[in-house]
Structures are given as structure tokens and as C-alpha cells.
Amino acid sequence: MTDWTIRPGRDTDAAGFIGLIFACWSLYPGVILDVDGEEPHLRALASYYTDQGGALWVANRDDTVVGMIGTKPLEGGTWEICKVYVSPDLHGSGLGHALLERAEAHAIAKGATRLALWSDTRFDRAHRFYEKRSYVRSGPIRVLHDISDSLEYAYAKPVEGIEILDAAAAASAIPHLSSILIGCVAEGAGVSFLPPLALETARAFWRGTATKVAAGTHVLLAAWTGGVLAGTVTLAMEMPENQPHRAEVAKLLVDPTIRRKGLARALMTRLEQEALRAGRPLLLLDTQAGGSAERLYRSMGWTELGTMPGHALRMDGTFGDTVFFWKRLA
């Protein structure tokens, strides 16, 4: 049971907002709050967001401001999440999630197709929180030229859709991608691992993938639904020099708790498009015989190359067959 309430913010909450932000910034040496010099809008924050077509919420506990969040529209269907602060004594309580859910739901109801935010590079706890909420690094670092010498990371995510992750985005997605991989392995997916898959093993795999993305040898795709990162697939293009026209498909994964939404098919469709853009019209893949992935590939026009009996261990310790497929893209 929570001991806070969330309501729309008001201009009269100004003192509480300022006190909360000061308490949060004080955890980080060198981060200085200069209200009148750099943050004068804090004196009438609700009006500030209303004037921009946005909204503001405050969390109260015993008439004390213990949390806040705002959101406002940008261009092209993007809504920015702003001023996300929770009293330090309530970190880990779930209040941050409750506030973010309120702001995201409002933005989506208003037509948001993409959510974005900025976070000081020093706020490492906040980064882990946003990454847990399916945000990934997006674009260059922003320099504010303020009294605190602030540098900010950009984070973003689509509400629905598939995006290519660059190296920075891939690295920031490691926690979420690891969770998806662990869940799929636990369900018996034939993706090189056996359950129970250790968290550090999963993270090491995705760190390696992020390194390959940075090297330009792999293309990593991620899919979101309802603002949740729920699927991924990789195009591996590191081929021998006499096979520059070929690539391989790896790690088609969809969160076991978020299935039957067409994400696997959408990921494969987008991957084929990216393969053509990269000049790789011939694709190969392998999959566990008899599984849902095999049925998907057949339905998408992939041609069976052959079956290798006893190619890989199943989760029950027996040897299972693997089917190899190829496809030449038009």
C-alpha cells in the first residue's frame, strides 16, 4: 500500500517543487540549483506546462511534495517527459514508476507516437530507471552551458514500432534485452543457450553485440509495443570476402509475456528491408525444428536448405534437430 497521492500540479506547489529538486540535485556534487538565474519557470510550473499544451503532476505525502513529473508535446508526434524527481527517501518505492506511467499514458492519449527525455550524465540512477522503462540512448550529448556545467544524455522510445539501435542505444538496452533473452531461453528457445541462463552471461552476450554494432558488422533491431521494448533480431554481416552479398539472421526474440502481436513477423520484415539497403540480398538462418519460428519462416517465403539431426541440446537434455533456411530477397 502506498502512502502518497498523485494529483495535477499547481503553481502554488512551487516551494515544494524547488525543495524536491534541490534535495535530488544535492546528491550529486557540482549540480547547483539556481532558481531565479536558470530555472525561473519553477515559480509557476503548472502554468509553464499548460502554456505549452502539456501537463504536470505532483506526488504528496502528508502534504509534502515527494515526487513530480511533467510532459509536453514537441514536433512530429514526440512528447517530452520532463522534471522526473522522487524524494531520495522514496527511491525504490515504485513512486517513480507510478509517475512515469501517469505521464506516458497522458502523452499517448494525446496522440504521442514517440516519447523522449533528457538526463544529466551524472544521474546514473536515473539512467538505470529509464532503461528499465524501455528507453534507449538516442542521439548526441547535449551541452547546457549552465552553472552546473551540465551534459545530458538523450533517451527515447517509440510507442509502437521498430528501430535500428546504434552502439549507444544497444549498450543502454542491455538490461532489457538480457531480460528478453533469459525469458526466451527459459521457454525453450533454441538460441545457443540453455536454462537457467545467468544474468551476467546474458549481459555479456549483448555487450558483445553492442561492440559488433559499433564495428559496423551487425545491425540490431528492436521492437516496442505499448512503449515496452518487447522484441529484437540481429543481422550479422561479417562474412568472408568472397561472400559480400550474404548475411545471417540471429537472435529473433520476442518477450514471452508479450506475444501474439505480430512482432516477430514485423521484425523479420524490417530486417529483410535493412539487408537490401546494406546490399545483402542472400540471407541464411537456422532454427529449432518443429517450433513456432520454423512455421514463421516458412510462411514468409524462406526455403529449407536441410535439417541437421541432433544439432543442439534441448532444455530437457536431449538432442534436437535444427532446420537451415535461406532466402534471396527481391
Image (tube, grey):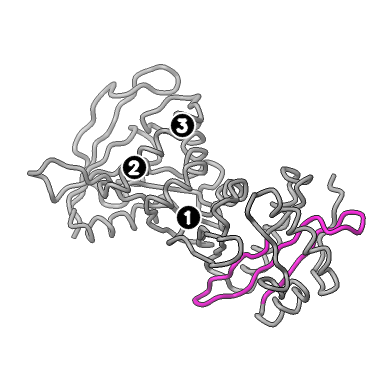
Query: Which residue is more in the foreground, 118 or 271?
Result: 118
Q: Which residue is mark 1?
A: 137
On the image, the x and y values in percent for residue 154 come to 50, 60
Mark 1 vs mark 3: in front: 1
On the image, the x and y values in percent for residue 315 come to 44, 23
Q: Which residue is mark 2?
A: 211
In reply to whether residue 39 is colored magenta, the answer given is no
Residue type for callout 2? Thr
In reply to whether residue 67 is colored magenta, the answer given is yes
On the image, the x and y values in percent for residue 143 come to 50, 64
Q: Please determine whether, in this image, residue 231 is positioned above or below residue 266.
A: above
* Residue 185 tag number: 3
Mark with earlier residue (2, 3): 3
Mark 1, Cα crowd under 10 Å, few <14 / some 14-19 / many 20+, is many
Q: Please determine whether, in this image, residue 173 is positioned above or below residue 49.
A: above
Q: SS class of the residue under badge 2?
A: helix
The answer to which quarter of the image holds residue 42 is bottom right
User: Which stretch is magenta?
Assistant: 54-83
Mark 3, Cα crowd under 10 Å, few <14 / some 14-19 / many 20+, is many
Count of marks overlaid on the render: 3
